[in-house]
Image (cartoon, helix red, strand yellow):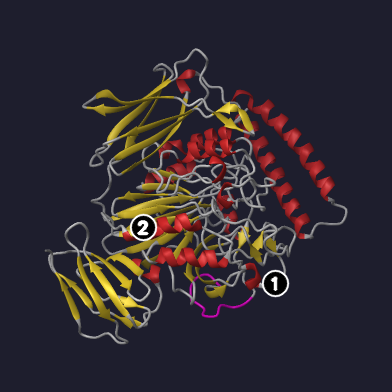
Amino acid sequence: MIFLKREVMTVAGQISVACVEARHSILAGTAGPAFSMRRFFAFLVAVSVVVSFGLRRVNGAGDWLDTEVPSEQAICFVLYTVSADTLKMTAQLYPFNDDVGRKVQLQIDRDGAWEKIAETRVSEKPYGRPQEDIKRWTAHFRVTPWDDSRDYRYRVVAADGMATLTGTIRKNPVEKKEIVVAAFTGNSNRDRRLKPDIIRNIQAQDPDLLFFSGDQSYDHKLHYQAWLLFGRQFGEITKDRPTICIPDDHDIGQSNLWGEEGVRASSPTGDSGGYFWSPQYVNSVQDAQTWHLPDPFDARPVQRGIGVYYTALKIGLVGFAIIEDRKFKTGPKGLVPMIGPRPDHVTDESFDRKSFDVHEARLLGQRQLDFLHAWGQDWDGVNMKAVLSQTVFANAAHRHGKYNYRLVADLDSNGWPQSGRDRALIEIRRSYSLMIGGDQHLATVIHHGVNDWGDSGYSFCVPSIVNFYNRWWDPKEPARRPIPGSLKDLGDYLDGFHNKVTMRAYANPDKRRVKRYGGEWGGRAAGYGLVRFDVSSREITMECWPRGVDVTQAAAEQYEGWPVTINQLDNYGRKAVAWLPVIEATGMENPVVQVIDEVHDEIVYTLRIRGNRFRPKVFRMADYTIVVGESPNRLKTFEHVAATAEEDDRVLEVSPR
């Protein structure tokens, strides 16, 4: 029976992939004339009926859509974070029987005995359209003050004590020299199997933080059931380490998402801007995936009462900004010309890029830019910073789905709108932050540029967990400044919107890779990313691991081109035009240095330096204010400091008051 179940799942996945690829061929105009859109959708409906019937018959009680479980199994999985002396945890539950109590407890192991530290009532709020008949079944815990200086063994108890789930709430690893983040994206429903290869590897690599950047669920109208499946797939690792989840378009039931501050979208394709399904449904998805994150920076909802979750988290000596790069983004339909089969797909090489850079089109929105501005100045307890988003600020994929579907520009990428993209990069680089995201089905390491190549920070777009809709980096033109490496086509390029990008690494699908490593997943360039922050040397190493590779084996290989190592200072790669005096601090190790342009009254950057000696670079001849140290009583301010065109022997000495 198990063998038959897997076979049916595999066939269903292959049929689904064929349907998706056929649809894209039709939209791109590459399908044969006899294969009309009407026939395609008729075929799709027929296949869906057959597959659905077959899966239910074969799976029986094990069908992923069947959420009935014995009361002893009522707790599916747990997500948690600890921030600012506060523990926040969400327990995701299966539906309770009517005769089962609704209270859920959080207990910790105190000297061998379980002690209740929190109790809550499970939420039975309806999910909302299109899952009006489904309840949330979440249990949220907030415990403050929380001692993050030690590990705690915990258990969640539900269903009148019949159901328990045990895990570890980890201490804040402030003593660790290296903070490790495992990053994932794109858990496509083309493969609903469990993920034992990922679980094995993550337990071996033992990261300090898990980051799921979006599309944890691909079942647009069935988030509750798909979320339970996600928990069965990844709960074994989320129960023992802090986890960040941020939902993306497929999670909230759309093909793409341009949130436009919560307006109603005209269709599930989303290209008009906004959210198609009910605000209650969107909030239910966010309740399940993000409630456990630290409290939002600015909790005011957007339009129609849709909540926000952008916030900050510290793990060890690394600070993370968690943003919603699609909630405020403007939809393209009707705003820019349609020069392709879809409002978001441009297929004409000669299209006018400047006309697409609409001034009023937003990307992050002012609220999130304000958040990044404030967060970038706060270096309390951290040596390094990173920004976590749904996707990266570039349009790197040239081919989609099939080899013959070449896309000039994709408005679903964060390469558009260009000015919004530039504003985001300018704010992020002020804090020397690495950017980590997903969504693109194409793993890349890119050095971003605004006015010149490499004048901003680096991004790591991690590969999809399940990558059935493939994409390729395949530029037609050679690099303007080639970079030697094991991969071809590395160096300086213009992306589809003529943003400046420097490609450092990528993982294209390649059938030849199947026999080398990763099996079917290596050929599809599926996998996950690992980022190592060395908080002492300030080096950042990005690793890209194929699915199916056993990292415990000495011969385990990453995708070709990885690992990529950079220095923290590379994340503001802008070339110096002028220099300020050397800052020399005594009695202050690794002080924070902030440089302010006095003419524009603008922060140039804020950085916790390495060591006690630092020469600030600046980008124009002017007078500057330099602030050294940290609040409340160790600040030293130097005003009206003139920049010089060359480095000189001036020194500004700083010592504690």
The disc at residue 501 is none
Q: Nearer the viewer, residue 411 or 594?
A: 594
Q: Residues within 10 Å of mark 1 (few under 14, many from 20)?
A: some
The disc at residue 374 is 2
Q: Nearer the viewer, mark 2 or mark 1?
A: 2
Q: Position of residue 100 (x, y in %)?
A: 47, 15
Q: Image check: 634 left or right of 380?
A: left
Q: Nearer the viewer, residue 158 or 17?
A: 158
Q: How far apart in space, not on screen, are marks 2 and 1 (Cα)?
A: 38 Å
Q: Position of residue 602 (x, y in %)?
A: 36, 70
Q: Which residue is the site of mark 1?
A: 351
Q: Amino acid at mark 2?
A: Ala
Rendered residue at 77%/42% (across/down): 44
340 in magenta: no
Q: Residues within 10 Å of mark 2 (few under 14, many from 20)?
A: few
Magenta-drawn segment: 477-488
Q: Image check: 544 left or right of 646?
A: right
485 in magenta: yes
Q: Position of residue 53 (x, y in %)?
A: 72, 29
Picture quadrant of residue 240:
top left
Element at label 1: loop
Q: Amino acid at mark 1?
A: Phe
Quadrant in the picture for the N terminus: top right
Rendered residue at 53%/64% (across/down): 420
Element at label 2: helix
N-terminal of the pair, mark 2 or mark 1, is: 1
Picture quadrant of residue 413:
bottom right
